[in-house]
């Protein structure tokens, strides 16, 4: 254990003190901040460009509507269309709209012609279509002499809410509101995505560490005083701690940098068509309903069983890391001077991770279905899929069984990786294939 701790400490301190680690740890949040700054800068500049639109309205429908917005100005003209088409650019307009007179109020598809020298962005087109559609609807209602309030009363929103509570809930099972389902769905995807990223980032660090020591022949000196298994485990633990340190620093720095950028730009300075479209949609939302929804969100978020979710997530986090990091360590030990040799062994590792990530939507669509149950039990999938199921309160026996399978798999895969590692670190100048790897599992080592 002393040797294992010494190796772990060496792996951790050696990498943390490197200039490359410090640079990457600092430059990563700064890079994200730079991307956010550039995006915010161009968004703020783009938001200041106003579209001036000339409208030829044959039926005088749009004049009665409020079409103006921060980034769009509408003017109307009664001139002939051909005259307007030849002069609207010289008159300083960006766009010419032509709406013919509507003769049939029951007509559903209305074609509005537009003329412009430049291509319009999709958000701008959608915003114009929405404004004109609302104006035509209001015109049809007015011409039909239908009471607007009566017509609006026909629109009905149906919200499904679980009615179980108290004794009924204890008799039938746990109840969940729609809001808790939404939160669980979002949380499951976030947790699954985090595991997906951790496996590749941390596993890649382990593989590069093994490759460097083997190529530089440092491992031959180290192995004279420790066993290969101790060296590999120390590397897994040390590199894992390095990765956790890096992630914790990023968790602190990234929000701080983004918050400072938000204060620099200010929300009112970024006024793009997309922002305007979102603001217009928010106008239709009742403020009381919004406040009530936020209060419900906070209540349901606090009501989640975090004392169960967080420990279980950490178990699968560590289990997934040790399984896949051991694979990467074994691959790193097979590589000599040709780095392309690793490609043939990477695919069997990458495929299960990608499949598990693709299965996440199926898990939160049916968290108790056969696909979700299988994925949360299979050890190569469970580090990603079981954390995605946890917010939906799967049966405790399934969680415990999955953890037992995961722990057994961790022991088995580390054993397999160690058998490959103990031979691979001494193997130079030989082409390695799967048949050769299978022989390494049964080599006797003294």
Image (tube, rainbow, N blue to C red):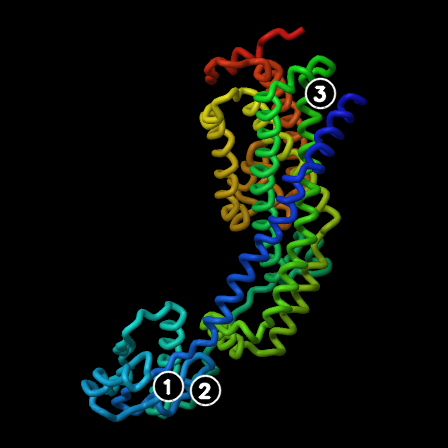
Along the polypeptide, which appears first: circle 2 or circle 1?
1
* Residue under label 1: 74
Q: Is 346 placed above or below 247 here?
A: above
Between 137 and 130, the one lying in front of the other is 130
Residue 258 in sight from this viewpoint: yes
Badge 2 density bin: few <14, some 14–19, many ≥20, Cα 10 Å? few
Q: Where residue 300 appears, x then y in whole percent? A: 68, 61
Image mark for residue 150 = 2
Residue 400 in sight from this viewpoint: no
Mark 2 or mark 1: which is in front? 1
Whole-number angstrom distance, CA of label 3 to CA of label 1: 74 Å
* Residue under label 3: 230
Along the polypeptide, which appears first: circle 3 or circle 1?
1
Badge 3 density bin: few <14, some 14–19, many ≥20, Cα 10 Å? some
Q: Is label 1 in a helix, a strand or a loop?
A: strand
Q: Is 408 placed above or below 42 here?
A: above
Q: Is 270 placed above or below 27 here?
A: below
Whole-number angstrom distance, CA of label 2 to CA of label 1: 31 Å
């Amino acid at each position: 254990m002393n040797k294992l701790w010494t190796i772990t400490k060496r792996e951790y301190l050696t990498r943390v003190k490197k200039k490359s680690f410090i640079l990457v740890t600092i430059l990563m949040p700064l890079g994200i901040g730079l991307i956010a700054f550039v995006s915010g800068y161009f968004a703020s500049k783009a938001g200041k460009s106003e579209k001036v639109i000339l409208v030829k309205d044959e039926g005088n429908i749009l004049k009665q509507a409020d079409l103006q917005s921060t980034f769009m100005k509408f003017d109307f003209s009664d001139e002939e269309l051909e005259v307007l088409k030849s002069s609207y650019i010289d008159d300083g307009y960006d766009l010419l709209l032509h709406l013919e007179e509507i003769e049939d109020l029951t007509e559903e598809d209305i074609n509005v012609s537009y003329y412009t020298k430049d291509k319009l962005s999709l958000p701008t087109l959608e915003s114009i279509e929405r404004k004109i559609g609302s104006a035509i609807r209001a015109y049809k209602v007015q011409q039909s002499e239908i009471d607007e309030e009566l017509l609006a009363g026909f629109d009905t929103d149906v919200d499904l809410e679980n009615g179980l509570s108290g004794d009924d809930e204890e008799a039938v099972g746990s109840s969940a509101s729609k809001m808790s389902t939404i939160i669980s769905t979002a949380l499951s995807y976030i947790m699954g995505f985090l595991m997906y990223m951790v496996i590749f980032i941390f596993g890649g660090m382990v593989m590069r560490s093994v490759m460097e020591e083997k190529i530089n022949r440092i491992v031959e000196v180290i192995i004279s005083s420790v066993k290969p298994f101790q060296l590999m485990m120390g590397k897994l633990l040390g590199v894992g701690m390095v990765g956790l340190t890096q992630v914790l620093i990023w968790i602190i720095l990234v929000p701080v940098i983004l918050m400072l950028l938000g204060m620099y730009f200010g929300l009112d300075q970024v006024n793009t068509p997309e922002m305007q479209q979102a603001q217009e949609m928010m106008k239709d939302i009742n403020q009381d309903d919004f406040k009530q929804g936020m209060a419900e969100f906070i209540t349901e978020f606090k009501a989640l069983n975090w004392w169960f979710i967080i420990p279980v997530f950490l178990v699968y986090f560590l289990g997934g890391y040790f399984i896949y990091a051991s694979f990467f360590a074994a691959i790193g030990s097979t590589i000599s001077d040709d780095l392309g040799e690793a490609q043939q062994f990477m695919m069997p590792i990458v495929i299960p991770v990608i499949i598990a990530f693709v299965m996440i939507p199926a898990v939160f669509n049916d968290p108790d279905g056969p696909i979700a149950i299988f994925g949360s039990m299979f050890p190569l999938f469970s580090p990603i899929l079981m954390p995605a199921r946890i917010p939906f309160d799967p049966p405790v026996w399934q969680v415990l069984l999955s953890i037992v399978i995961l722990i057994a798999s961790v022991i088995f895969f580390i054993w397999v990786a160690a058998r490959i590692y103990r031979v691979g670190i001494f193997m130079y100048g030989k082409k390695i294939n799967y048949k050769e790897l299978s022989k390494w599992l049964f080599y006797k080592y003294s």
